[in-house]
């Protein structure tokens, strides 16, 4: 069985890291898997990226060009929106030349593919969704908007007052393309996103299956906490709260302001916070206790050390599909506290391996942090966290489920 995994990047970004883990998991299980990307960061020979200097230059320009239609919407909310209009990517030609049995799409925005390109793929398509983009007119994070139930338009993220705006155009384009794709199978990493798919006007008639992202539990595993803190030069007699996100402070979806409100309501003493994904800003937030800004870490081993050095990981995001941060933390035996939204409940079992706070309530988020850090059975909670991941998200477990799906799709063909 030959599988081609298509994603905009191989290891840059949350969706890319989840996709690359699946790719490596399939190889371990003996599947002939290749990964095709627009932006290659690794030196993995099983990942195919731009080959020539010209292709590499174009791959850097395409994400910028794809955003050009958004220039019309000067007051839009600055969250990801992908028009996916840019032609001549050459990706479909590469896909068809490779001639796999299955084409497995993941995050394909950033100018990599035009939505009309999907019609030209000659093999069955499995599409794992990492956000809302496939079922909307262009936004990746829909928040409270429910326009996708029928047709997008008057997009609140674009701050548009017109029915026929860029979101409506994107929705109509997807509707036309999807209607022609008879071998399109949707995978959702979370039950939450699968429910949205079933309600959406664009994808409600398509096959959908819930399969989580995998994690390498032999890498993300518990290690000695004192040793981890010594490496990071963190005090061993403090309770450490971890907040980790790409662009942690400035991405409004990651909930930094909600976190600040929660931390300012903590009654605990002898605590410190560790922030990953941001260097120390010019104007430092006053939490009422010390904060450590670690900037960015680019390898799994450093992440493992950080999770193990921490006593709790807080994920105050406003929307999450299946958070890599939560999964990685639990796999290292560190409990997680998050709002009860999206796919968080697929991983965090309330008051068993972490705490699910009332959505966007900073007081309850603070309650969750205090509950974990003060729990008399803290060691048991940490063990529950690890066992949850071993049972449901281990790379071997997930890869085998994907292989079953591939066989099912090929038999339908």
Image (cartoon, grey):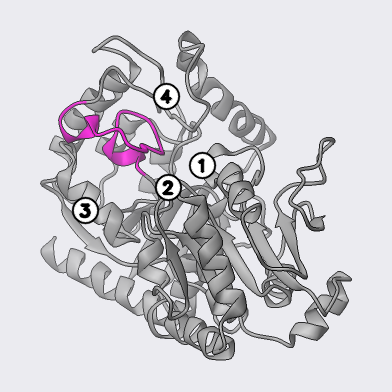
Q: Is residue 187 one of those drawn in magenta?
A: no
| 156 up-or-down from 188: above or below | above
Circles 1, 4 touching at the beta carbon (< 8 Å): no
User: Could you tell which of marks 4 and 3 lies nearer the N-terminus?
Assistant: 4
- The magenta stretch spans which residues? 132-151
**Residue 89 rendering spot, x and y as whole percentages:** 47, 31
Residue 92 in sight here: yes
* Tag in front: 4 or 3: 3
User: Could you tell which of marks 2 and 3 lies nearer the N-terminus?
Assistant: 3
Spatial separation of the CA atoms under disc 1 and disc 2: 7 Å
The residue located at (83%, 79%) in the rendering is: 236
User: Could you tell which of marks 1 and 2 lies nearer the N-terminus?
Assistant: 1
> Would residue 272 appear left or right of 13 to someone viewing this image?
right
Residue at which label 1 appears? 253
Answer with the quarter of the image where residue 217 lies: bottom right
* Tag in front: 1 or 4: 1
Query: For mark 4, does the 10 Å Cα neighbourhood hold few (<14), some (14 to 19), or many (20 or more) residues?
Result: some
Determine the secondary structure under disc 1: helix
Determine the secondary structure under disc 2: loop
Spatial separation of the CA atoms under disc 2 and disc 3: 15 Å
Q: Residue 195 carries which label?
A: 3
Residue at which label 2 appears? 319
Q: Which mark is residue 87?
A: 4
Query: For mark 2, does the 10 Å Cα neighbourhood hold few (<14), some (14 to 19), or many (20 or more) residues?
Result: many
User: Could you tell which of marks 1 and 4 lies nearer the N-terminus?
Assistant: 4
Spatial separation of the CA atoms under disc 1 and disc 3: 21 Å
């Amino acid at each position: 069985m030959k599988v081609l995994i298509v994603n905009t990047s191989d290891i840059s970004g949350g969706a890319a890291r989840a996709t690359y883990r699946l790719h490596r998991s399939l190889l371990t299980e003996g599947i002939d898997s290749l990964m095709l990307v627009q932006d290659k960061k690794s030196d993995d020979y099983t990942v195919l990226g731009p080959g020539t200097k010209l292709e590499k230059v174009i791959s850097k320009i395409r994400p910028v060009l794809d955003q050009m239609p958004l220039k019309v919407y000067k007051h839009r909310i600055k969250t990801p929106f992908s028009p996916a209009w840019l032609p001549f990517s050459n990706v479909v030609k590469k896909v068809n030349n490779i001639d796999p049995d299955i084409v497995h799409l993941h995050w394909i925005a950033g100018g990599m593919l035009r939505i009309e390109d999907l019609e030209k793929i000659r093999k069955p398509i499995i599409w794992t969704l990492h956000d809302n983009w496939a079922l909307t007119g262009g936004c990746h994070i829909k928040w409270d908007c429910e326009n996708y139930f029928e047709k997008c338009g008057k997009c609140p993220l674009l701050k548009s007052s017109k029915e026929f705006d860029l979101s409506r155009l994107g929705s109509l384009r997807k509707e036309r393309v999807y209607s022609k794709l008879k071998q399109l199978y949707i995978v959702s990493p979370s039950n939450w996103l699968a429910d949205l798919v079933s309600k959406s006007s664009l994808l409600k008639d398509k096959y959908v299956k819930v399969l989580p992202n995998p994690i390498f539990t032999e890498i993300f595993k518990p290690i000695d906490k004192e040793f981890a803190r010594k490496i990071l030069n963190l005090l061993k007699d403090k309770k450490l709260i971890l907040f980790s996100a790409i662009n942690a402070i400035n991405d409004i979806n990651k909930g930094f302001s909600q976190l600040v409100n929660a931390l300012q309501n903590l009654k605990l003493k002898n605590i410190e916070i560790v922030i990953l994904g941001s260097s120390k800003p010019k104007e430092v937030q006053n939490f009422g206790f010390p904060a450590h800004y670690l900037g960015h870490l680019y390898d799994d081993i450093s992440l493992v050390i950080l999770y193990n050095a921490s006593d709790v990981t807080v994920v105050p995001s406003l929307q999450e599909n299946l958070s890599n941060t939560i999964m990685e933390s639990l796999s290292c035996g560190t409990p997680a506290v998050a709002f009860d939204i999206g796919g968080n409940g697929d991983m965090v079992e309330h008051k068993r391996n972490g705490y699910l706070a009332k959505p966007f309530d900073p007081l309850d988020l603070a309650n969750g942090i205090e509950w974990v850090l003060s729990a008399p059975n803290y060691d048991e909670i940490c063990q529950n966290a690890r066992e949850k991941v071993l049972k449901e998200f281990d790379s071997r477990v997930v890869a085998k489920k994907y292989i079953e799906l591939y066989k099912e799709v090929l038999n339908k063909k």
